[in-house]
Amino acid sequence: MSGEKSLKIALLGCGTVGAQVARILREQREELATRAGANLELIGVAVRNIGAPRDVQLPPELLTTDAHGLIERADVVIELLGGLQPAGDYIAAALRRGASVVTGNKALIAAEGAALAELAEQNDAQLRYEAAVAGAIPILRPIADSLSGDQITKVMGIVNGTTNFILDAMDSTGAQFDDVLAQAQALGYAEADPTADVGGHDAAAKAAILASLAFHTNVSSDQVHTEGITEITAEDVSAAAAAGYVIKLLAIAQKSEAGISVRVYPALIKRSHPLASVHEAFNAVFVEAENAGDLMFYGAGAGGAPTASAVMGDVVAVARRVVSGGPLPASSQAQSATMLDFTQITTRYWIGLSVSDEPGVLARIADVFGSHEISIEAMNQQVSAEKSGAQLRILTHEASEAALQSTVAALQELDAVLEVQSVLRVEGN
Amino acid sequence: MSGEKSLKIALLGCGTVGAQVARILREQREELATRAGANLELIGVAVRNIGAPRDVQLPPELLTTDAHGLIERADVVIELLGGLQPAGDYIAAALRRGASVVTGNKALIAAEGAALAELAEQNDAQLRYEAAVAGAIPILRPIADSLSGDQITKVMGIVNGTTNFILDAMDSTGAQFDDVLAQAQALGYAEADPTADVGGHDAAAKAAILASLAFHTNVSSDQVHTEGITEITAEDVSAAAAAGYVIKLLAIAQKSEAGISVRVYPALIKRSHPLASVHEAFNAVFVEAENAGDLMFYGAGAGGAPTASAVMGDVVAVARRVVSGGPLPASSQAQSATMLDFTQITTRYWIGLSVSDEPGVLARIADVFGSHEISIEAMNQQVSAEKSGAQLRILTHEASEAALQSTVAALQELDAVLEVQSVLRVEGN
């Protein structure tokens, strides 16, 4: 079929992902027309510099630096510029005209997703952003649609490929963070300034989006407790491995009767957990739902073609509704929810201490945990040949972050404790 | 919200899954009304025996043996009887009335899905069946919707929990098939008559559904080449393990320029492949798409509450469209496609031979492969203390099934070959 209906598609940005979207729109015209119920006509590509080299061959007349002019003529706008501005202005302009928008802009959606969704609804336009979380993996639509008859209780995602590549390499080679980061930068898995990735900020934006959809509420990046992986040492990784665990940077959204907690931190998970077998730069999102039980969605989290696949899935969905009318995508994010303070979360902990190697130390340390009502699941002591004192690793049962922090403060007061070397959380069953 | 709109829901069947659907409809009224945009009012449950014990407490007046009478009054019919008849008649009756249908009936959809989809379209009704494949895992909607802007090239699914439980137990314990089957039956993971599961027929129905959606065409169960796991021995499993592989029953749908192949058989996959870490009765579907690359969807493949979760996701989607109108779910299954004969598929092979332990045997065997244009990737010989002769395991590069079958026939003619013990295929990279 190449129906008589035609939709005008404007593409904003022609970088790694944009070039692939342009290629697919042009190479797969017939197939896309069949699936969408209308021709998807690429009417223009807004770029900053017309003359810049690109990964796709485009007729020169498609390129423009006038994004607003292009948006004026479009039925569907695909925004792949990234960043808050001018992307936010462009999207708002498109929605105000009643044009639908597909974007992969996680930072913008995490910051202003609720306002933009409202603007879309007011103008009977659609706003879709599957590509914003976990690249090619269809995760937002399954959460919003397929699980809409269920209650999601927890989402745990490996949603940043750079940090997973680094942690996976540390796990398999025993190398230190700095060395692996340099290698990841050389291979193109990490940027020259890796802060957004290794600091957990990229994952925090995705955590906010996942939490908003999973719990039908609005969570923004700044409500996400965020820790990165820069403090993770080769010793942490090898000690975790010896105990049967692997360290992953997790974006966690959790709902309990008390409220919602959204957080990003490196955590230990058991080797047998499905998330443990996510290697290299792959992403995966693990979902726990009341009825469905445990689900996991796995795939490429970045890259031009994989991310373009997610964008095009959204474009087809948007086009189908533009052609046929019908309900807007579920936007039941209106429910208000109590956001828990980070000190209110409960999880398990894994604490690394350097202690003086003398009688009675273990009892005194165990006593500190007990007096803060944290019970210990396992304790492992190793006398180090290199360092003074002994190395102690303590795995706790579930406890509140507040209790943990008081415990750590009390441990630091003990003469027998030379140093609190690491405090990591333990997730998954 | 508990809007003024209300949809009348009829439930056919109140077994393991039906009881959970009834429970969720009654317990989650408010939530479901918010998500669906209408109250979902359970108006009746059709059962064969009103007095039978059930897993859910229902007001007696909801129960009826008059399924057709119930269907007459319904906006949405949930069919959870299973089997071809009378389920097929009920669904057809509902669709002819313009009522939408949600079903988990894989046998019926695999046999008559195309005709029922057409009937639905003619009557502007919806037909959804997410629960028919891989239980709780949202897989059909991602394939049909999220990947609609991509080209799926291959789907490999572990879609039968019973056989995965058996193969996983054989792998972890070294036990023989019959012993593990008996244990699975005792634990409730296998039925008293396990034929549908261990013979691959249940997986074949799911393979047909996956292929139809992935390739936008119509494939029925009888077009699926189907082999079960009853011939798999503990020796196969341990030899595969020694070579770094695990044996899984795979439902495979593959598209090449030559055509479409749909098949179910036990196959070796590398331990590092994401499907290899699917344990116990869990399901997973691995998808290869041109742009998205490799994706995997993992979760519970059966069970009352997990399957009910998938059913309810469909019910909410159906309700949303009944309330607001709009496009029917993508039903672009109209494309015709060439179905390849099983002899035309190409894959890798792993052949177990018992051979006489004398000079020149390996060369003669290698010669047979070469003369059929199959190249050998690896060959492993072990002299058995228990059995006469030597055990030979041969891993081939990619070859056609026709070439493989000629090779096996020629091997059986060789005096040096005492027995062709097993021929298994090798999948995944």
Image (cartoon, coloured by chain):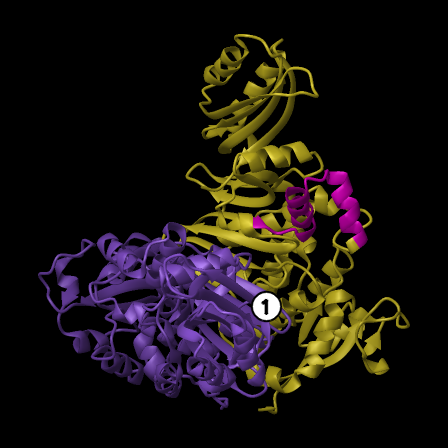
Chain colours: A purple, B yellow
As helix, strand or loop, the secondary structure at mark 1 comes to: loop
The residue lying at 36 percent from left, 58 percent from top is A386
Q: Residue furthest left?
A: A51
**Side of A392 where B165 appears, left or right:** right
Residue corresponding to mark 1: B126
Query: Which residue occupies the foreground of this view, A398 or B310?
Result: A398
Secondary structure, magenta segment, majority class:
helix
Q: Can you say which quadrant of the picture contains the C terminus of chain B?
A: top left
Residue B257: x %, y % from top left:
41, 39
The answer to whether residue A122 of the structure is visible from this angle is yes
Q: Quadrant of residue A315?
A: bottom left
Q: Eyeballing the image, is A298 above or below B427?
A: below
Please report, as a chain letter, where disc 1 is located: B
Please state which of residues B314 and B93 is positioned toward the viewer in this rendering: B314
Expressed as whole percent of the image width and height from the top left, the position of residue B13 reads: 77, 67
Residue drawn at x 46%, y 22% is B374
As displayed, is residue A174 above or below residue B56? above
In this rendered view, identify the residue nearer to me: B359 or A205: B359
The magenta segment is B157-186
Which is nearer the eye, B279 or A43? B279
Residue A3 visible, this angle: no
